[in-house]
Amino acid sequence: MCGIVGLFAKTPSIEAELGAHLAAMLGTLAERGPDSAGFAVYAPADAATMKFTLRPPGGTDPEALLARLGIPDSSIQTRGSHAVLSVPAEHDARARAALAAQAPDTVVVGRGRAMELYKEVGLPADVARGFGLGDMRGTHGIGHTRMATESAVTTDGAHPFSTGPDQCLVHNGSLSNHNGLRRELQRVGYGFATDNDTEVAAVYLTARMRDGLSLGDALHGALRDLDGFYTFVVGTGTGFAVLRDPIACKPAVMAETAEFVAFGTEYRALAGLPGIDTARVWEPEPGRVYAWEHGPTA
């Protein structure tokens, strides 16, 4: 019953309004997921910088956190309950180690050169407003409105799930074999923060890509290895990909114009986009991977 949205900008005008469009799309699907919401927004990657989206404990002074970490030439910016730590890319490993050692209660929500990721418990419109989504620019983004059915209503359990740099996943559906797959992934060294089946799917894709597969090949493998009903939208540093299970009982619709590609669980999430009346609109086919990409990241 969850709601998914995605928007891929082809023109500067859509990039400038990407956050406002995503916020409206999320709000439209509020009743599909009233307990929590989240989104990832991607901007052109900076090869020299790694960004960590963090969720520090309530009352944390971001500047004090920055000083405690001791990463040279770094900065931090607060957005709602989250903060974005920017460090020189060569200090990526050092920053991860410092966060684990000096700020163990701070959750790393996501990291990457292009991606910022925000999620929180609450109505989608309130979550979007709290993080200032409407004012964000970006090349592409995905979002999710959650109705929890198999795990607790928590910020950790909200989507998107990010388990690799500039990679995140949102999901509508239910995986029936996630417990067994979680155990298999744990045996080869992967950790999990929640009991959410979507996190298993995200880790699965990360693991397969670390094994050398492309995202497309990893998604094709998911058709073989993941049991259940699902629609996935996967964000990457250069674009997003869509996959529905071979039965495709979960709703999905896409639209494309000269200015954008858009995804929604229902058409009404796309209805307010500029030029939607002349867009090519279609339902993604079962078991087929769809992907759109900008040029490679720097």
Image (cartoon, rainbow, N blue to C red):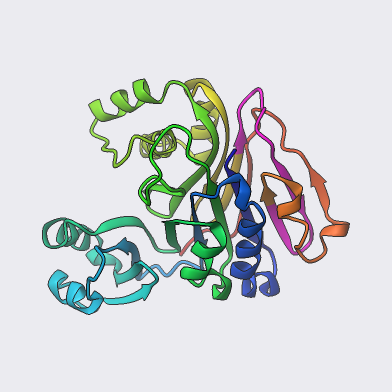
Q: Is residue 31 above or below residue 20?
A: above
* Left or right: where 252 falls relative to 189: right
- Asked whether residue 255 is drawn in magenta, I would say yes
* Displayed quadrant of residue 166: bottom left
Residue lying at 19% horizontally and 72% vertically, measured from the top left: 65
**Residue depicted at x 72% and y 32%:** 285
Which residue sits at x=62%, y=48%?
Answer: 31
Q: Please, is residue 166 above or below residue 81 in the view?
A: above
Asked if residue 24 is positioned above or below residue 35 in the image, the reply reads: below
Q: Is residue 292 visible?
A: no
Q: Can residue 60 be found in the magenta stretch?
A: no
From the viewer's side, name the closer residue of 16 and 4: 4
Q: Is residue 191 above or below residue 143?
A: above
Q: Nearer the viewer, residue 50 or 163?
A: 163
Position of residue 141 in the picture relative to residue 36 (left or right): right
Query: Is 260 displayed left or right of 212 in the figure?
Result: right
Quadrant location of residue 23? bottom right
Q: Which residues are magenta?
A: 243-262
Instruction: Tell me residue 217's x, y (percent).
Output: 52, 33
Provide residue 246's location: percent of width, then percent of height: 64, 23
Quadrant that contains the N terminus:
top right
Residue 72 placement (x, y as % from top left): 19, 76
Q: Residue at x 39, y 39 (%)?
A: 199
